[in-house]
């Protein structure tokens, strides 16, 4: 296998799928043949501007035809596609531009206007809108004959554990998600896929664009960020059969008034990005009659490596390794843990990145040959289900015992008036680390004093003394990345620096 674009698009048309819808957008459907034609025009436009192998092509675009065509056009000519978070502030973009030094930035004018000074200072040779990038209709661009290990995409990590790093993916990893698509969600050509996450997020890129194209299915791409309020209309418009989202979004949908039959077209719901609370799983199944298949992947793997199975999912677990992936749990010394014991997740999978751009020390810490260190802590229960305990960085000790934030948060979420919860460890006046719990109440929760009192009683009954929060604080929202991950360091900053300082 060489250039991934051949399997993603050229083969689809050659196999007779040219008339099938590849994309659905707000303006209608785009067939595989029509998408290939636009991708060739984008590729020809990049070549005309001197873009060649391994030159970076940055995308600051909303999801849609322009995003897909620019991304795939870069792959076609052997360049490196570089998706950008469209909500990243100017300072964040400046850091990425200095790190990657893109040759071209294809940007939506409205998005560009908000960061014009940053882009101007970056010295990018070509900054242009998608319409200007395109070569004239009928332009052709043959796939660059690159090898399977040629760089294809740089995806920047979300930065929850430090400065964002560019995970370098090669052409073979672009088409390595079939083991999940086939075995777990049974993706087929008749499916329509909708994700509430954006394509710059690896989770959405793999499941809402790459795998649908490989299966000759239809990717539903929505320009505006989906919200709880807009989800009903999107479901009616696109009638998706697979829905990919994150735990926070599922929880917020449950807090809204979406009709129980709104997901009538959906046969599979998938969650990733963070641990799916058992209460959210149960409530979703009761209200909509659908399991949520919890899984875990990473920027460094694009596709899922652990996942629940339809008909065999269990609340609070992540199923087990996806076919084609191997997983192991190691202790801090790198030794396999005993059955039932917690360990750090390491995975060997076909879609793992080649490393981090310009970060040899980080690469050595996270990659060991074909194995990648997730940094998530798991144990395998007596029935063989993998149970997520959180990130290794999130765990902390109190009185010599490990506190697992997800376990305490799960107790809080069992209170009917709690929508979200986040536990962190922070120093109190004595200099000792103690747990502090932040919660977001449901809109109809009412009296805060009553709520915190009830929650305190529940925590006292169900949480061991060492892990019991020193204080419960009610907030309007929890700080999260644009990909939905809880930013625990910002909660700790509130305790130390903000108005909530004890």
Image (spheres, helix red, strand yellow):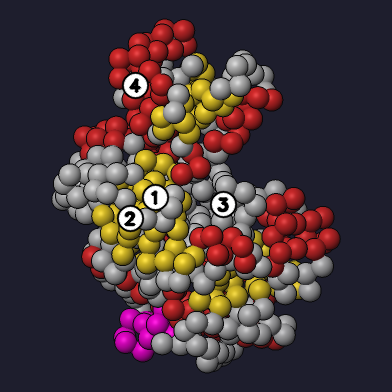
Query: Residue 57: x, y in percent?
Result: 65, 72
**Residue designated by label 2:** 336
**Residue designated by label 3:** 158
- Is residue 14 part of the magenta span, yes or no? yes
Query: Residue 170: x, y in percent?
Result: 50, 76
**Residue designated by label 4:** 463
Say which residue appears at 66% left-offset and 85% top-offset.
52
Say which residue appears at 80% left-offset and 63% top-offset.
122
Please, what secondary structure does the residue beneath circle 4 have? loop
Write the start and end of the magenta stretch as one range.
6-18
- Work out whether mark 4 precedes mark 2 in sequence or the reverse, and give the earlier one: 2
- Judge depth for marks 4 and 3 and give the one in front: 4
- Work out whether mark 4 precedes mark 1 in sequence or the reverse, and give the earlier one: 1
- Work out whether mark 2 precedes mark 1 in sequence or the reverse, and give the earlier one: 1
- Work out whether mark 4 precedes mark 3 in sequence or the reverse, and give the earlier one: 3
Query: Residue 75: x, y in percent?
Result: 54, 79
Between residues 340 and 280, which one lies in front from this camera angle? 340
């Amino acid at each position: 296998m060489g250039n991934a674009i051949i399997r993603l698009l050229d083969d689809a048309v050659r196999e007779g799928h040219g008339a099938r819808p590849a994309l659905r957008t707000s303006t209608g459907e785009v067939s595989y043949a029509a998408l290939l034609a636009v991708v060739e025009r984008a590729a020809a436009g990049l070549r005309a501007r001197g873009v060649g192998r391994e030159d970076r092509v940055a995308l600051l675009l909303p999801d849609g035809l322009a995003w897909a065509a620019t991304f795939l056009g870069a792959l076609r000519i052997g360049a490196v596609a570089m998706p950008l978070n469209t909500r990243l502030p100017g300072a964040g973009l400046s850091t990425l531009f200095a790190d990657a030094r893109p040759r071209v930035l294809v940007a939506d004018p409205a998005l560009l206007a908000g960061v014009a000074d940053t882009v101007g200072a970056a010295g990018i040779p070509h900054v242009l809108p998608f319409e200007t990038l395109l070569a004239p209709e009928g332009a052709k661009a043959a796939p660059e004959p690159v090898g399977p290990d040629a760089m294809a995409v740089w995806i920047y990590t979300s930065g929850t554990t430090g400065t964002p790093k560019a995970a370098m993916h090669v052409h073979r990893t672009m088409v390595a998600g079939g083991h999940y698509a086939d075995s777990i969600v049974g993706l087929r050509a008749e499916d329509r896929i909708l994700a509430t996450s954006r394509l710059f997020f690896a989770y959405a890129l793999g499941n809402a664009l790459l795998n649908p194209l490989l299966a000759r299915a239809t990717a539903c791409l929505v320009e505006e960020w989906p919200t709880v309020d807009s989800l009903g209309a999107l479901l009616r418009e696109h009638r998706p059969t697979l829905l990919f989202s994150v735990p926070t979004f599922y929880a917020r949908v449950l807090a809204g008034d979406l009709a129980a039959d709104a997901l009538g077209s959906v046969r599979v719901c998938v969650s990733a990005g963070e641990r799916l609370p058992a209460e959210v799983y149960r409530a979703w199944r009761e209200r909509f009659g659908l399991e949520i298949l919890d899984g875990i992947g990473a920027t460094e793997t694009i596709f899922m490596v652990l996942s629940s199975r339809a008909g065999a999912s269990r609340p609070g677990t992540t199923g087990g390794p996806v076919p084609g992936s191997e997983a192991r749990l190691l202790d801090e010394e790198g030794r396999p843990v005993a059955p039932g014991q917690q360990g750090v997740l390491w995975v060997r999978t076909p879609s793992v990145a080649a490393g981090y751009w310009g970060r040899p020390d980080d690469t050595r810490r996270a990659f060991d040959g074909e194995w990648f260190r997730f940094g998530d802590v798991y144990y395998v229960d007596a029935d063989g289900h993998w149970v997520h305990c959180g990130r290794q960085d999130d765990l902390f000790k109190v009185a010599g015992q490990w506190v697992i934030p997800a376990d305490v948060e799960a107790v809080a979420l069992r209170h009917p008036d709690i929508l979200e919860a986040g536990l962190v460890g922070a120093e109190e006046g004595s200099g000792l680390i103690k747990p502090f719990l932040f919660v977001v109440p449901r809109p109809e929760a009412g009296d805060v004093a009553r709520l915190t009192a009830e929650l305190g009683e529940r925590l006292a009954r169900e949480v061991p003394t060492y892990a019991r929060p020193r204080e419960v604080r009610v907030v309007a929202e929890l700080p999260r990345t644009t990909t939905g991950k809880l930013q625990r360091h910002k909660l700790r900053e509130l305790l130390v620096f903000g108005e909530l300082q004890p």
